[in-house]
Image (cartoon, rainbow, N blue to C red):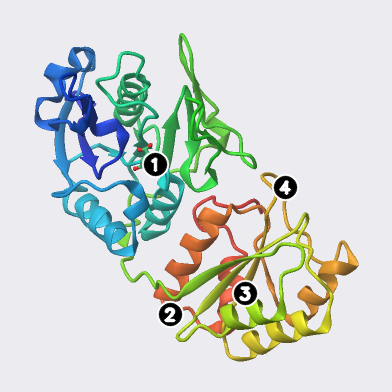
């Protein structure tokens, strides 16, 4: 590739785009159109950077399915004009958003790197500069056959992860994310070292990008805890218009064996509402039938979330239900890794 790569930087909101007004001590939004003046180091990168900001940048706690669609539409509109995309969002829900974007973009052939920071960009000890500079650098990387990366990733504190494998683990440490069930795609030190074998394989050029925007919001995460009552479970499973349930169970997919609990789940399944079993553990996977406390879940037709994160599971469910996958096919689609979000 002879020309410098074109990178589109999309700012949706969050700490990274803030700067401290030293007079008032308040955080205010940073003007991305002057990015290269604020971070002169970016001039050293051999690339052309353009910016798009959400009109009203949001704290990532306000992210929702509509904002996911807004973001994916920006990428869709600019897909052919840019070689890579860097998306800046707040860290709080970054793993959810980045997972959702990974499902919404089928046959992705270009890098999309999410990043953010724990301290604002103007802060003396900020982690924003390194995260931003390296995320951009990763998005520019090209090989003979095309971009080095052709998937949705998350770069934070010297590590590049597959985005739909990540989870936020700290609200204070610079190391805010982890990918407990999948190795980092790259580590940044003196050199950027890629774990090439863990990257998603490139798609054939003939496979065109398909943008999926029908996200269904009528899903719920039911997190188990000791002593959860029949009344509570019954209420949750009878939410009007409910179309899918992520069941956050214990350990390797275990849940109470009491009849009332199993009967409520069975009744939900009979209504054509899929239920996916994911573990509350930070790492490891669901193996239904391994313990007696998960055998009945398997018998009644609960779907295994394997080693998927809750963030990715809810995004995948919203996507599959939005695509109107039938109840009969739901299990097959959910248990198949679609974007590298779970192990085979
Ligand atoms: N509350 C912020 C957000 O998620 C925190 C951050 O940006 O890291 O938008």
Q: Quadrant of ligand 1?
A: top left
**Tag 1 residue:** 150
On the image, the x and y values in percent for residue 67 come to 27, 58
Gap in Å between the C-alphas at discs 4 and 3? 19 Å
User: Is residue 325 or residue 11 the one in the foreground?
Assistant: 11
Task: Give me the C-alpha separation between circle 4 and circle 2.
Answer: 30 Å
Q: Label 3: state its secondary structure.
A: strand
Question: Is 290 located above or below residue 8 in the figure?
Answer: below
The residue that mark 4 highlights is 284
Name the N-terminal-most of marks 3 and 1: 1
Alpha carbon separation for disc pair 3 and 1: 31 Å
Q: Nearer the viewer's eye, disc 4 or disc 2?
A: 4
Q: Residues within 10 Å of mark 3 (few under 14, many from 20)?
A: many
The tag earlier along the polypeptide, 3 or 2, is 3
Indicate which disc residue 324 carries.
2
Q: Which residue is mark 3?
A: 275
């Amino acid at each position: 590739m002879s020309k410098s790569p074109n990178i589109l930087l999309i700012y949706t909101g969050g700490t990274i785009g803030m700067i401290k007004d030293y007079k008032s001590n308040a955080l205010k939004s940073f003007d991305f159109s002057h990015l290269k003046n604020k971070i002169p180091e970016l001039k050293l990168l051999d690339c052309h950077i353009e910016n798009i900001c959400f009109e009203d940048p949001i704290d990532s706690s306000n992210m929702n399915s509509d904002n996911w669609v807004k973001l994916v539409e920006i990428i869709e509109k600019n897909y052919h004009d840019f070689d890579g995309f860097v998306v800046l969002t707040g860290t709080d829900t970054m793993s959810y958003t980045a997972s959702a974007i990974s499902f919404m973009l089928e046959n992705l052939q270009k890098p999309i790197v999410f990043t953010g920071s724990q301290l604002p960009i103007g802060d003396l000890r900020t982690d924003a500069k390194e995260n931003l500079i390296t995320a951009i650098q990763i998005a520019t990387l090209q090989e003979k056959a095309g971009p080095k990366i052709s998937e949705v990733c998350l770069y934070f504190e010297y590590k590049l992860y597959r985005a739909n494998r990540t989870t936020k683990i700290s609200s204070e440490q610079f190391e805010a994310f982890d990918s407990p069930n999948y190795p980092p795609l790259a580590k940044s030190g003196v050199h950027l070292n890629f774990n090439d074998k863990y990257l998603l394989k490139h798609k054939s050029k003939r496979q065109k990008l398909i943008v999926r925007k029908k996200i269904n919001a009528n899903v719920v995460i039911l997190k188990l805890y000791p002593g959860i009552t029949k009344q509570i479970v019954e209420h949750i499973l009878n939410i009007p218009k409910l179309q899918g349930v992520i069941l956050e169970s214990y350990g390797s997919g275990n849940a109470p064996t009491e009849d009332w609990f199993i009967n409520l789940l069975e009744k939900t399944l009979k209504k054509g509402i899929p239920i996916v079993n994911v573990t509350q553990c930070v790492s490891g996977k669901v193996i239904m039938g391994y313990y007696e406390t998960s055998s009945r879940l398997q018998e009644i037709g609960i779907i295994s979330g394997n080693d998927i994160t809750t963030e990715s599971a809810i995004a995948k469910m919203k996507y599959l239900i939005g695509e109107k996958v039938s109840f009969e096919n739901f299990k097959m689609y959910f248990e198949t890794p679609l974007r590298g979000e779970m192990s085979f």
